[in-house]
Image (cartoon, rainbow, N blue to C red):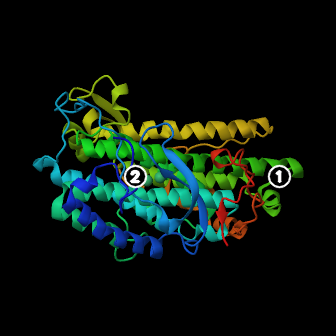
Amino acid sequence: MSSINYAEKIPNNVNLVNDRTLQRALEHWQPHFLDWWKNLGPSDFQAADVYLRTAVSVDAQGWAQYGAVKMPDYRWGIFLADAVPGRTIGFGDQMGQPVWQQVPGEYRSTLRRLIVTQGDTEPASVEQQRLLGHTCPSLYDLRNLFQVNVEEGRHLWAMVYLLHAYFGRDGREEAEELLARHSGDADKPRILTTFNEPISDWLSFFCFTYFTDRDGKYQLKSLAESAFDPLSRTCRFMLTEEAHHMFVGETGLSRVVKRALEVVKELGSEEPQKVRAAGAIDLPTVQKYLNFWCSSSLDLFGSEISSNSAQNFAHGLKGRPDESQYEDHVLREKTMTLVVPEGEQQVPMLNALNEVMRESYLKDCEIGLKRWNRQIERAGLSFRLTLPSSRFRRTIGPWAGQPVTPQGKLISREEYEKRLPEWIPSEADRAFVHSLMRKVVEPGKMAAWIAPPERGINNLPVEYEYVKLH
Ligand SMILES: [Fe+2]
Ligand SMILES: [Fe+2]
């Protein structure tokens, strides 16, 4: 069951060959996807040989195979985690009943919306990152960028498969729309704001893979709990791929911090201007980028109080990440205390699930910060990186538009406007970071603003030629 059929036009482990109509529909969509990839995927590197991993099975162990691939030849396909025999609904009002193999009519439009929203983020991030290759700090990093990109392309396939297989004509139309909206497009933007922010430098890319891909992880974890079994199985396999994206973010930021610390040591000074003059990114600037991308990603969880998320949970469509770790899976009796600008408020737990998710997400975000702060501490500096308060710079929920400091303190609007450039990258900060972005493509060489990684990919040395440019 878990082996993947690569003999077909569309690699899959869903027995596509036995469903001619679906196979034809997806084979019709495939060239549209490839056109999109060529036009809006990574700019200029389509002829390069990239050392990429490709899924060969859906087992957690040994699922991937590595080799040189030209990106347009990457075998995008449909891979679902194996079905769990006798799986039952794990939460909500229908808890304990068998999971669904088809979409119940009453939840059809809600499920479609959830799948489209998730699906929209996948190609969006590829579009946001399409120019980054031109300023890669090393071949190792260039390869990682492309690995993330092709896998986000595959995640789009995952969602398009569900739309085609379970949502009939509406689903097919939505699949076309997923290629018609574009990140940052004035007329047809991507659905969520964060996915319309350009990612034009590598510090932003590392923050994006650290914070925004981690939001992706939490969304996928909660959809993996879904009573709609094909969605659950699709998301479970996507999570296997997603882990690498966050690795890219965490190690990328860790290497930026490491390089800053080396320069501080060489200079005998922490002064940002001196660190910058020596070609590294000073830690206060790293903090501003963390503030920007963390706050932007926090909005992706939606409003603190949400009747949609209550319904999605009660109906069994979307659970909490790692649902089984909780005791109560119905939540009809529980409440939660939320702090809003007017004071404390008691809310039914079902309506506060976005906040529950946001809190567990923030805990996960802390892991990298602890690691970076240990590096900084070992270097003998008192500076510490922190996550901004979940009230800072929000555009959704009760804290939307409130003048709040990164520490979560409500201040006057005037002071907020004045101090904002201290907290998120100013024009000058962005210009400085951009000035460092120059392409380094000699095998093993790194740009001056980033330390080399501790090891290469798949046990290869760091000096390996991960992308052959010809
Ligand atoms: Fe993804
Ligand atoms: Fe991702």
The residue that appears at 64% across and 51% down in the rendered structure is 252
Point out residue 261 in the picture as x, y percentages from the top left corner. Answer: 78, 47
Q: Residue furthest front?
A: 7
Q: Is residue 441 left or right of residue 60?
A: right
The spot of residue 300 in percent (x, y) is: 40, 52
Can residue 417 be seen here? The reply is: yes
In which quadrant of the rendered image does the N terminus lie?
A: top left
Disc marking residue 400? none
Q: Is residue 360 above or below residue 275?
A: above
Residue drawn at 25 percent across, 41 percent down? 229
Q: Secondary structure at mark 2?
A: helix
Of all residues shown, which one is farthest toward the left?
Answer: 105
- The foreground one among 81 and 314 is 81
Q: Is residue 197 visible?
A: no
**Residue 329, percent from left and from top:** 26, 28
Instruction: Using the numbered discs, state the Cα–Cα distance from disc 1 to disc 2 in whole angstroms.
Output: 36 Å
Lower sequence index among marks 1 and 2:
1
Say which of 276 and 440 sits in front: 440
Q: Are marks 1 and 2 in contact (CB under 8 Å)?
A: no
Instruction: Looking at the picture, tell me which residue is in the foreground, 252 or 361.
Output: 252
Reading the image, the residue beneath label 2 is: 300
Tag on residue 263?
A: 1
The crowd level at tag 1 (other Cα within 10 Å; few <14, some 14-19, many 20+) is many
Q: Tell me the amino acid under the disc marked 2.
A: Leu
- Mark 2 Cβ and ligand 1 under 8 Å apart: no
